[in-house]
Amino acid sequence: MTTRSLRTRLAVTGLATATAIATGLGGAAQAQEIKIGAIVPMTGDLQAYGETSLNGIRLAQKEINADGGAVEIVVGDTQTAPQSGVDAAQKLVSIEKVSGMVGALSSGVTIPIAQSVSAVVGVPQISGASTSPVITTLEDNDFLFRTVPSDAGQGVALAQVTKERGIDTVAIMYVNNDYGKGLADSFQSAFESVGGTVTQSVGFEKNQAAYRGELQNAVDGGAEHLVLIAYPESGQTILRQALEGGTFSKFIFTDGLKAPELVSALGAQYLNGTFGTTAKSLESEGGKHFAEAWAAEYGAESDKPYHDTAYDAVYLLSLAAVKAGSTDPAAVRDALRDVANPPGEVVHPGEYAKAVELLKAGTDIDYEGAAGSQNFDSNGDVAGTFELWVIEDGKFVSEKVFEPKAM
């Protein structure tokens, strides 16, 4: 066979395969091949979260493809840095031609990607972890969504549980970016509204060798408890130096520090009794399915957050492509609220084929995900509930999942 003949045969075979995938379910709501970019931190300060988020993305891909879908995942490493994140997203959009992106994790990376890439090129971006209140009103041309609630809610939640534990005075240290500053301001406002006192609120830069000056500034004013809003790598340095220098020994964490690596590195005896909050859904059918599927795939439940929200983002982008009958990024964006929000027949994770059949029949669907209802408002935000957890015997133990009271 000549080289030209071989190329012709391969081209015909490839076209036939693609056509079979695209037309196998027939109609405008047929299963769609879709390429999705995963913009996650495989290195840098949030590497530990990037790995579990990517596992959530891969789990959704595996389930969808086993159920008649055709999802391809392409990974871009943000390195937990704004410029690296923008570069990774630009490559996914311009070279890989993705129809949507899942990520990034940190708001300080998600926001510049949205402003420089997603909103400019017109590719939908769903973050499963970026919680800054700034995102709500960001000028993103309606291409930025998130499957995790805003820190405007987490700040209220953390303030309420802190006051409930009889703590009236705290100091704050926060990573100096959109995530840290937004959450620090939200917490302080809510804590003071319920009678609490914040003696100091001190920003810090990531990845420094020493934070003794910032710790000394934070301890001025006499607070015994430190609310630390940080990521694991810098957080570990701050905690170690606080313990060594005797500035603080009582800590309150936020979602960015719910990482078992911290306990292993510092010792359970120093962190037992530490509590914090993380976005988490109430018990649901979708959550139960996800937990069982995760355990079957990876062997154990993850202590880290945001793997379920990343998983939901893949389902939503895939179902939006089916609804649109297209993988054009703008068409996928336009269909996201159609598959995520009521009214419609409820579909859960693991029910991709059912969802496709409903869409094929012209029936509206309402995806209820692993992380709860993913109902996008006009800003691309979702409502949510939060988990109060405490470190006991070196383990993260859930005390309750609750909806913050209105302030």
Image: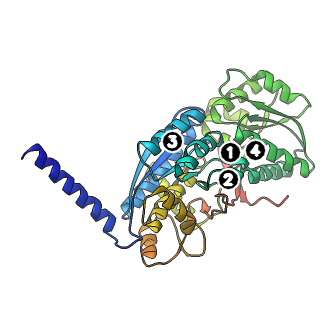
Q: Nearer the viewer, residue 129 or 237?
A: 129
Mark 1: which amino acid?
Answer: Asp
Q: Nearer the viewer, residue 254 or 118?
A: 118
Mark 3: which amino acid?
Answer: Ala
Q: Which residue is mark 2?
A: 279
Residue 2 at what x, y percent from top left? 8, 45
Pointers 2 and 4 in contact (C-beta within 8 Å): no
Pointers 4 and 3 in contact (C-beta within 8 Å): no
| Left or right placement of residue 183 versus residue 262 in this view | right
Among numbered discs 2 and 4, the one appearing first in the sequence: 4
Secondary structure of the residue carrying numbered label 4: helix
Residue 18 at what x, y percent from top left? 29, 59
Q: In this rendering, which labeled residue sits more in front, label 1 or label 4?
A: 4
Rendered position, 34 above or below 223: below
Mark 4: which amino acid?
Answer: Leu
What is the crowding at mark 4: few (fewer than 14 residues within 10 Å), some, or many (at least 20)?
many
What is the crowding at mark 3: few (fewer than 14 residues within 10 Å), some, or many (at least 20)?
many
Q: Which residue is mark 4?
A: 183
Quadrant of the drawing holding the C terminus: bottom right
Pointers 1 and 3 in contact (C-beta within 8 Å): no
Residue 131 at what x, y percent from top left? 68, 48
Secondary structure of the residue carrying numbered label 1: helix
Q: In this rendering, which labeled residue sits more in front, label 2 or label 4?
A: 4
Kindly indicate the quadrant of the structure image that contains residue 50.
Answer: top right
Rendered position, 61 above or below 167: below
Among numbered discs 1 and 4, the one appearing first in the sequence: 4
Q: Which residue is mark 3?
A: 89
| Left or right placement of residue 208 versus residue 87 in this view | right
Distance of mark 2 from mark 4, alpha carbons? 13 Å
Among numbered discs 1 and 3, the one appearing first in the sequence: 3
What is the crowding at mark 1: few (fewer than 14 residues within 10 Å), some, or many (at least 20)?
many
